[in-house]
Image: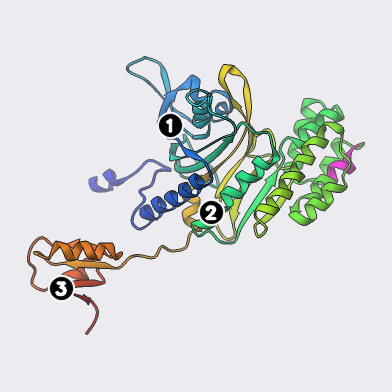
Amino acid sequence: MTEKGEKALLPAGMVDLLPPEAAQESAAISRILDLFSACGYQRVKPPMLEFEETLFDGAGAALSQQTFRLMDPLSQRMMGLRADMTTQVVRIAATRLSGEPRPLRLCYAGQVLRVKGNQLRNDRQIAQVGAELIGSESSGADAEIIALAASALEKIGVTRLSVDIALPTLVPAIARTLGLSPSESADLREALDRKDAAAVKAISKEHGKLLSALLRAAGPVERAVAALSRLTVPEDAQEELERLLAVVERLRELKPDLRITVDPTEHRGFEYQTGVSFAFFARGVRGELGRGGRYAARAAGGCFEPATGVTLYMDSLLRALPEPDAPSRVYLPAGHDPKIATALREKGFVTLAGHDPVEEDRKEARRMACDYWLSGETLRKVEEN
């Protein structure tokens, strides 16, 4: 590789976002945040770096292995470069905004950096946009967050959208009632993840019928709700199941056209969630567009308060968006009238100003990939005969 090529080489999982995708991402983020703001979510902007003890507090501990660390030369304390922004928003809510009335609605956008990617997301630097609703236990809060995210995705042009709703706390609640040992619970969890009905029955012959019914309940919302409504589950799990059904019912009222699927046994990727969780997808697009769910947020005084939120991933979203409409470009020859240039930009044109006289303005406009060129006070098409 040449010296020039070596200088252009980036670390694995790092990419340059070029035109027009960089502008498309920025515009999409602005539109999402505008919708969040219109729905009462106030924007916060946490720093890229924090001390480890705050960054890994509470749910943040789940990302400790994905976080780049470095020593702060001023305080001589270890810091982490954020791998996710949710825990930072929770910290702000518990400290700087602890006196604000609940439920507290906050939103954010920014870059995160992770030690390594995964099979679905190779990028290690990711632009995130998200919203958190902190301080409400209501099932309506869960439905609000899911509907808000769906509306945001639709607003920026995502089509064929679907949301998969899970309840990662349901199976543990059932396992506790059944008196399964930790190893048996782990085996059950693995069997359910594989959708292995035979293995599920072998682990718990007495309750295999119930667990198999949970497996069969996964699917489109109409069939899933009907199947789950007929189930008789242990008392400890009944409240979890009723909450799931309440969230789905309210969500269908808020977003009647949204495609919804339900999988009551799914938990992968939702390890720190404490209730109804979800992930967004678009047909034909690789990877999740976003995910979220209910969790316990660290509050002032070391206690916890209920919370739910969503994080959208811009790398996946760009793959789901239609090609952006490029505005018409106008070449302005050297010595052009600046008032005309201003008027063109106000009409939505992009202007490229020439600084030195050229042999032929139209050829220069074509070279600069412009659609028009300015001849005196007249706008002319570059390709017209």
Determine if residue 288 is in view. no
The residue that disc 1 covers is 46
Q: Nearer the viewer, residue 385 or 309?
A: 309
Which residue reaches farthest right? 206
Which residue reaches farthest top? 76
Q: Nearer the viewer, residue 174 or 243?
A: 243
Q: Are the two marked residues, 1 and 2, in contact with CB atoms closer than 8 angstroms?
A: no
Which residue reaches farthest bottom? 385
Query: Could you classify mark 1 by the number of other residues whose Cα lies within 10 Å: few (under 14), some (14-19), or many (20 or more)?
Result: some
Q: Residue at x 51, y 57 (%)?
A: 155
Q: Amino acid at mark 2?
A: Leu
Judged by depth in the image, the label closer to the viewer, 1 or 3, is 3
Q: Amino acid at mark 1?
A: Pro
Write down the quadrant of residue 132 in the picture: top right
Determine if residue 119 is in view. yes
Q: Residue at x 8, y 72 (%)?
A: 359
Q: Amino acid at mark 3?
A: Glu
Which residue reaches farthest front? 101
Upstream in the sequence, badge 3 or badge 2? 2
Q: Which mark is residue 153?
A: 2
Find out whether residue 371 is within the magenta segment.
no
- CA gap, disc 1 and disc 2: 24 Å
Q: Is residue 19 above or below residue 329?
A: above
Q: Is residue 158 above or below residue 66?
A: below
- At numbered mark 2, what does the secondary structure look like: helix, strand or loop? helix
**Is residue 382 found left or right of 186 in the rendered image?**
left
Instruction: Give the x, y percent position of residue 331.
Output: 19, 67
Find out whether residue 208 is within the magenta segment.
yes
Q: Are the two marked residues, 1 and 3, in contact with CB atoms closer than 8 angstroms?
A: no
Instruction: Give the x, y percent position of residue 5.
Output: 27, 48
The residue that disc 3 covers is 377
